Image: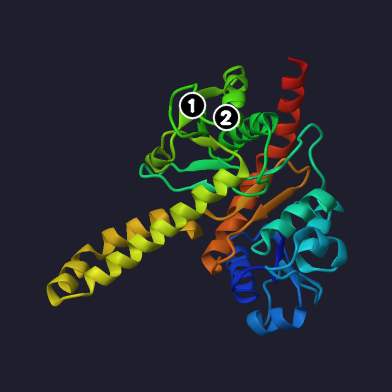
């Protein structure tokens, strides 16, 4: 398997992508890892690379504040775009980037291309849940506007991914809404609800945002606007809770003594809410595998993104989506 990693994407590039790649290379000696970026900057971080790591040199980078479509069209040599081009040309099986999300989405569409029959690809991260199982949420920002048919396709792709990559025999599919009743919601959720009822998977109905972290479903379907708000709200709340806990645990000597006793439990709690534990989010719906890492990814997160990407390819998720999509069209 060949995995291309954008070495210049993300808040901590090139350090985090390069070091995460080296850690993954040591863990998976049978995987060929390709760092795409400035070879001098990569060498400054890594020195001598492991035998199963190579470099595709480019000095061009897409910044986080650039307009995505224009940047992808103008910067064809950018590390993010070249990583996707390697997938398109069959030189890599999957591309990973922690860079500009919109640009990666644009590169996925214009360079890699969509699966036939999929109108809009979806960004699908795994949200942490209190039971430790996690919930796959799609979409969280690839498409701010969506139609009922797009959400039906998201549900189909999420069901396949949960079965193939997460080993859930019968995933519970939920629809993000403001209430659990079937008649609740806006025009989009009201129109997609009956479509999901007709699909050959386990649709559990509407799910409220407050129940997501309690594991109300295995796959949560929503438009990218609502999904991104949900994602940022949970990230913000988790960061605020962890900061408040740290401040309180160090406020007085008795608190510090209690914190020392509770340290293992607090570490487990932090890991449960840490995006780095879950690796990257696949862009489902593309005809080549592309995985988006969090913009703030550190070495650990990048290594886990490689693990996620490896599973994505090994379980042939894209081929299964194509096959199931044909089946749903025939029916």
x, y percent for residue 162: 56, 36
Q: Is residue 248 above or below residue 191?
A: below
Dot 1 surroundings within 10 Å: few (below 14), some, or many (20 or more)?
some
Q: Is residue 100 above or below residue 123?
A: below
Query: Where is residue 219 drawn, in percent x and y?
Result: 53, 35
Total labels: the figure holds 2
Q: Earlier in the sequence, mark 1 or mark 2?
A: 1
- Residue 306 in the image, given as x and y percentages of width and height: 62, 57
For the question of whether residue 196 can be seen, the reply is yes
Is 152 placed above or below 200 here? below
| Res. 95 visible in picture | no
In this figure, which residue is indicated by the disc labeled 1?
184
In the image: residue 304, left or right of residue 38? left
Residue found 79% across the figure and 42% down from its top: 114
Do the numbered discs 1 and 2 sit on residues whose CB atoms are within 8 Å?
A: yes
Task: Answer few, some or many: residues within 10 Å of disc 2's Cα (few below 14, many 20 plus, some between 14 and 19).
Answer: many
Q: Residue at x 50, y 60 (%)?
A: 276
Q: Is residue 99 left or right of residue 205?
A: right
Q: Residue at x 85, y 68 (%)?
A: 77
Residue 144 is tagged as: none
In-front residue for pair 206/162: 206
**Nearer to us in this view, 218 or 315:** 218
Q: Which residue is mark 2?
A: 189
Residue at left offset 64%, top offset 63% = 98
User: In the rendered image, which quarter contains the C terminus?
Assistant: top right
Q: Is residue 295 left or right of residue 8?
A: left
Examine the image and state in which quarter residue 305 appears. Answer: bottom right
Query: How far separated are the C-alphas under marks 1 and 2?
Result: 8 Å
Foreground residue among 148 and 90: 148
């Amino acid at each position: 398997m060949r995995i291309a990693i954008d070495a210049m994407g993300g808040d901590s590039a090139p350090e985090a992508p390069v070091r995460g790649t080296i850690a993954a290379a040591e863990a998976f000696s049978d995987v060929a890892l390709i760092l795409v970026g400035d070879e001098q900057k990569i060498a400054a971080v890594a020195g001598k690379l492991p035998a199963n790591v190579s470099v595709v040199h480019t000095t061009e980078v897409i910044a986080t504040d650039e307009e995505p479509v224009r940047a992808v069209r103008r910067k064809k040599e950018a590390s993010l775009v070249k990583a996707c081009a390697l997938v398109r040309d069959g030189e890599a099986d999957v591309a990973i980037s922690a860079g500009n999300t919109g640009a990666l989405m644009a590169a996925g569409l214009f360079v890699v291309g969509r699966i036939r029959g999929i109108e809009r690809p979806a960004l699908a991260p795994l949200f942490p849940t209190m039971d430790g199982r996690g919930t796959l949420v799609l979409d969280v920002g690839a498409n701010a506007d969506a139609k009922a048919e797009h959400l039906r396709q998201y549900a189909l792709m999420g069901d396949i991914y949960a079965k193939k990559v997460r080993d859930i025999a019968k995933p519970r599919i939920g629809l993000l809404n403001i209430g659990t009743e079937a008649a609740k919601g806006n025009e989009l959720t009201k129109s997609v609800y009956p479509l999901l009822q007709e699909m050959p998977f386990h649709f559990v109905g509407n799910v409220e945002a407050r129940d997501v972290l309690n594991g109300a479903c295995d796959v949560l379907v929503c438009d990218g606007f609502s999904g991104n708000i949900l994602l940022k709200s949970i990230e913000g709340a988790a960061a605020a809770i962890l900061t408040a806990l740290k401040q309180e645990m160090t406020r007085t000597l008795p608190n510090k003594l209690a914190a020392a006793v509770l340290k293992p439990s607090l570490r487990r709690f932090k890991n449960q809410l840490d995006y780095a534990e879950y690796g990257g989010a696949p862009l489902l719906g593309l005809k080549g595998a592309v995985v988006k890492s969090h913009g703030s990814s550190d070495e650990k997160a990048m290594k886990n993104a490689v693990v996620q990407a490896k599973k994505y390819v090994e379980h042939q998720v894209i081929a299964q989506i194509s096959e199931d999509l044909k089946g749903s069209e025939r029916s």
